[in-house]
Amino acid sequence: MLNSLWTPTVAGKISLPHRLAMSPLTRNRATPDGVPTDLNAEYYAQRASHALIITEGTQPSDDGQGYMTTPGIYTEAHITGWRKVTDTVHKADGRIVIQLMHVGRISHPDNTPHHRQPVAPSAIKPAGQMFTASGMQEMPEPRALTTDEVAQTVDDFRRAAAAAIAAGADGVEIHGANGYLIHQFLFPTTNQRTDQYGGSLDNRIRFAVEVATAVADEIGADRTGIRFSPGNPFQLGDLTEDDTHELYPHLVRALAPLDLAYLHLAHGGDEELLGTLRELWPNTLILNRAGTDIATRAKDIDNGVADVITVGSMALANPDLVERIRAGAPLNDPDPATFYGGGAAGYTDYPTHAA
C-alpha cells in the first residue's frame, strides 16, 4: 500500500532515497547565543533515515529571533555549531537543509541578543503571549521596518543562506508560513505599508520573492526551498488571510520561474487551493498534512498531489520512524511536556524499535 513512499526522487540537486521527510520542529535546545551543540547533532543524526531533514527555524539575524535558545546561522560560532550537526547527519547517510526563519513581530525583547523592539512590516501588535526567562509576557507592538531596512533584511537572508552552506547544509528552506515575517508581508492584517511592499498583490508578495531570489542567487536555486501555510488555521499573532485564492496562486506564479528546489506546503484543509498550487508549481512539492496517518499522507503521492510528505511529531517521537513504518512496528507517542527546552528528555531519549 505504501510502495510509492519508498521510491527515490529529487528536490533540486538533493537526491532523496524515498519520500518521507522530517518537518521543521522548534525544540529550543541551542545555547543562549544560538549555537547548536553536540545534543542537537545527536538528535538530528538519530533521524537521518528520513529522506530529508528540515531543521527547526533558524534566525538569520539578531532581529530574526523570537524564542529562547533557538539556533542562529549568522555568526562564525553558529556555523561551527551547525557543522557538527551536518557532519553527523551526513555520516549517518542523511540529508539536511536549514530552515531560515525570521519571526518578525512574533517576539519579545527579552529573548533577543540586543533586547530591541521587534520589527515587522507594520507597527501592529500581535495577539498572544511569549515565553521568556521571567515567564509569559505579552508580545509588544513591533517597529515598522523602513524601506531600506527591508532591503537589509533580504540581505540578511542571503548571508544566512551562504552561512548555512558553509556549515555543510545541503540547502536551505525559507520559512514563509505560520505568521512569521515573510507571511506578515503577505496580508493586510499585518501589512499596511504604503511603499512598494504594501497594498497590491504584487507589492505584498514582493518581499517573499526578493528573499527567494537573493537566496537562490547566493547558493543556487537547486538548493533553495520555501514553505507556506495557505489557509492553515495555525497562524501566530492573530494574522488572518482574506484573499488566499488570489494571493497564493499569484505568489506561486511569481516564484515558479526561479526554478527553486521545492515548495513545502503546510496544508490548511483547502483542497481546491492545494490543487491549484500543485498545478502551478513545476518542481518538487512537499506536503505536510498534519493530524493524519502515514497511509493518508501517502495517498497524496499516489494521486500526484505531492512528491514528498513531511511528518512532525511522529518524527520527533520516533527517531527510527522510517524503519518502524517499513516493519509495521508500533510508534512511540510524543511527550508534549518535553517539546520546548530542557535536555535529552523527550529529545534524544526516545527508544528505537530495535531497542
Image (spheres, rainbow, N blue to C red):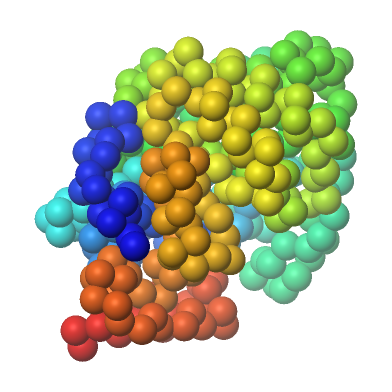
Closer to the camera in the image, 150 or 306? 306
Name the side, left or right, on which 42 lies relative to 172. left
Residue farthest along the bottom direction in this orientation: 355
Q: Quadrant of the C terminus?
A: bottom left
Residue farthest along the left direction in this orientation: 91
Name the side, left or right, on which 189 lies relative to 111. right
Q: Is residue 227 above or below residue 132?
A: above
Q: Position of residue 314 (x, y in %)?
A: 44, 70
Q: Quadrant of the N terminus?
A: bottom left
Residue at x-position 59% and y-position 18%? 253
Count of numbered circles on the image: 0
Q: Position of residue 8 (x, y in %)?
A: 23, 44
Q: Position of residue 80 (x, y in %)?
A: 27, 47
Q: Is residue 15 above or below residue 328?
A: above
Residue at x-position 36% and y-position 84%? 330
Q: Is residue 49 visible?
A: yes
Q: Is residue 106 above or below residue 194?
A: below
Residue at x-position 72% and y-position 73%? 135
Q: Position of residue 76 (x, y in %)?
A: 32, 40
Q: Is residue 178 visible?
A: no
Residue at x-position 81% and y-position 31%? 243
Residue 14 quadrant:
top left
Closer to the camera in the image, 331 or 162? 331
